[in-house]
Amino acid sequence: MKRCRLAIVRQKYRPDGGAERFVSRALEALSAHDMELNVITRQWEGERQDNWHIHICDPMKLGRISREKGFADAARKLWQRENFDIVQSHERIAGCDIYRAGDGVHRRWLMQRARILPAWRGKWLFMDRYHRYVMQAERTMYQAPELKAVICNAEMVKQEIIEDFSIPANKIHVIYNAIDSSRFVPANEELRAKLRNEMTIPQNAVALVFVGSGFERKGLASAIRAIAGTDRYLVVVGQDKADKQYQELAQSLGCQNRVRFMGMQKNTLPFYQAVDGLLLPTLYDPFPNVILEAMACGLPVITSHTCGGAEFITTGQNGYVCDALDIPRLSEAVMAIPSRFVDESMGIFARERVRDATPEKLSQQLISLYQNILD
């Protein structure tokens, strides 16, 4: 492969974001190949390797639409000026060679969000200027002649793109995220006991973890309601402007003494290692990394049909899949998760399922995609 100048476009790079972890894992994997790696971003908060070129592209912004449009126009100008061999955008910007649909399809997310809003607000959602701008930008990007390939991290998103934009299936490549199974490992009994003491969770209780920021979309209200009528504990890792509202919900349901709000955490590993399962009844999520991390740590997963991660779940074997708003079913699933030290068979199946989601496999799939595009 001749030395390829690859540009990856991501508006804001923060180390805790799922899309960013895909970018950094991909960059690390690709560093071993003879490629010039460029990142076009408004703001870079991560660590950088010596051979990554960071292009800061930060035009003035006055509101949400001007923020998106301003970055799109400036990023496109930059990549046209630099004449990169391949431009892989993680934002909806027309003119890129590859688009990674890490956020799924915007209309599908709005359809799910409308389910939890009063009917009049649900209708307004689709008339909102910002959402209309995003849906139009997405359509323009999919129709652009420059687009050669789309990367999805779930079959669910591939089907949505085919249905909504009539993109031929052979143009869409499902490349699952990678997980480092040597770092994300189950805890032994001693470590688990220590972590539980620190989090004030009884040693013999069954505890579940919820990991993710943006609590409305990730389904924290459903998670709290699902454990409310049970004896299960819930550890919440992540942050949201409406933190207090969710604490009040737990209080109103009488389960606040079994819910631990831990805030944003740079290192999520100890939280997986302290519990017995992951509870993520997300309204819409293409494939959150937390599912891979939890499964690698030997945790069964409860998630929703509108989460691409459901593709890795075999009901009753390594987790459960329910509607994001079906509280009775979610509660049943919560009660069906056993304590890891009574029965770890579900956790063993979970870890086994993600064993081949390696950084090497991700790197090989990307390299072969880039090779096809260059050819």
Image (cartoon, rainbow, N blue to C red):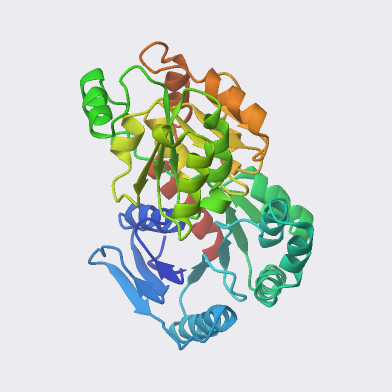
Tell me: 248 left or right of 304.
Answer: left
Tell me: 12 left or right of 333.
Answer: left
User: Going 29% across and 46% down the picture, which residue do you hit?
Assistant: 267
Q: Quadrant of residue 24?
A: bottom left
Question: Observer-nearest residue: 71 or 155?
Answer: 71
Q: Position of residue 41 (x, y in %)?
A: 41, 74
User: Going 32% across and 30% down the picture, which residue do you hit?
Assistant: 273
Task: Look at the picture and state if 290 lies above or below 111.
Answer: above
Please state, as top left, top right, bottom left or bottom right, where the N terminus lies in the image.
bottom left
Q: Position of residue 48 (x, y in %)?
A: 26, 65
Question: Observer-nearest residue: 86 or 136?
Answer: 136
Tell me: 3 left or right of 337.
Answer: left
Q: Is residue 6 visible?
A: no
Count the marks: 0
Task: Look at the picture and state if 58 lies above or below 182.
Answer: below
Q: Position of residue 339 (x, y in %)?
A: 41, 17
